[in-house]
Amino acid sequence: GQQLNQSPQSMFIQEGEDVSMNCTSSSIFNTWLWYKQDPGEGPVLLIALYKAGELTSNGRLTAQFGITRKDSFLNISASIPSDVGIYFCAGPIERGGNQFYFGTGTSLTVIP
Amino acid sequence: GAGVSQSPSNKVTEKGKDVELRCDPISGHTALYWYRQRLGQGLEFLIYFQGNSAPDKSGLPSDRFSAERTGESVSTLTIQRTQQEDSAVYLCASSNGFYNEQFFGPGTRLTVL
């Protein structure tokens, strides 16, 4: 199946630091979505991107839809303890039918 | 308002038994998805329902897996003759259309002994 590669796989940072993670694929995506998943819960949507080159912010979060449509990044500024969780990129590929593909996840730990 | 709910929250079963997992989507949401999440991994698409259209079953891993949804209401995912490799969290999500935000339920953790 499709591979959405996320990096880094895990991060350990100090509270207050900025975080950057990215997602790449060999396929072209129509939409890029970034989700956060807390333990024992389903993922929650953070940011949605719909156009190549689009840069969108949601509070301390900023995400960009890559120009090639094969990648996206998510930045978190001034991290706080509640940012802890697993972050997933996701989206439907062009001409890929109804499947949504999810990345392998980036596990974030914030040290107070 | 009520979110997506799933039941049971946990299910332990013996290898070879059948299990049925239930999803109650948000009222009015036309689209419903099932995903499988193995420990420490991302979500794996299983099946997609949109209104009264034929479901997209392209993600189902084998013919032991099936799902039903009546109209825009409850969906059930059935796994027959469970295997240990079926152990995972099964997540359901609903949305108001394909490109709209998917709202996830808390999942059902299935353990096959």
Image: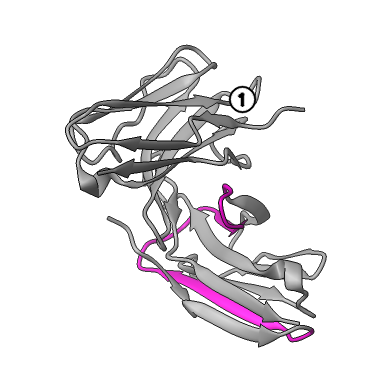
| Depth check, front residue: A29 or B95 | B95
In this rendering, the count of numbered labels is: 1
Return the x and y of residue A103 as percentages of the image width and height: 44, 62
Outermost residue, right direction?
A: A59
- Tell whether position B25 is magenta: no
| Depth check, front residue: A19 or B21 | B21
Seen in the picture, residue B20 relative to A37 is either above or below; the reply is above
Seen in the picture, residue B78 relative to B38 is either above or below; the reply is above
Q: Which residue is drawn at 23% across and 49% down?
A: B85
Return the x and y of residue B59 as percentages of the image width and height: 30, 40
Question: Magenta segment range?
Answer: A16-42
Position of residue A18 in the picture relative to residue A39 (left or right) = right
Q: Mark 1 lies on which chain?
A: B
| Depth check, front residue: B32 or A39 | A39
Q: Quadrant of residue A72?
A: bottom right
- Tell whether position A33 is magenta: yes
**Local crowd size for mark 1, using a 10 Å CA cut-off: few (<14), some (14–19), many (≥20):** some
Quarter the C terminus of chain B occupies = top left
Position of residue B61 in the picture relative to residue A6 (left or right) = left
For disc 1, the marked residue is: B29
Q: In which quarter of the image is residue A58?
A: bottom right
Q: Which residue is drawn at 68% across and 79% down?
A: A110
Identified by mark 1, the residue type is: His
Q: Which residue is drawn at 66% across and 86% down?
A: A13
Can see residue A95? Answer: no
Return the x and y of residue A33 as percentages of the image width and height: 58, 56
Quarter the N terminus of chain B occupies = top right
Outermost residue, top direction?
A: B70
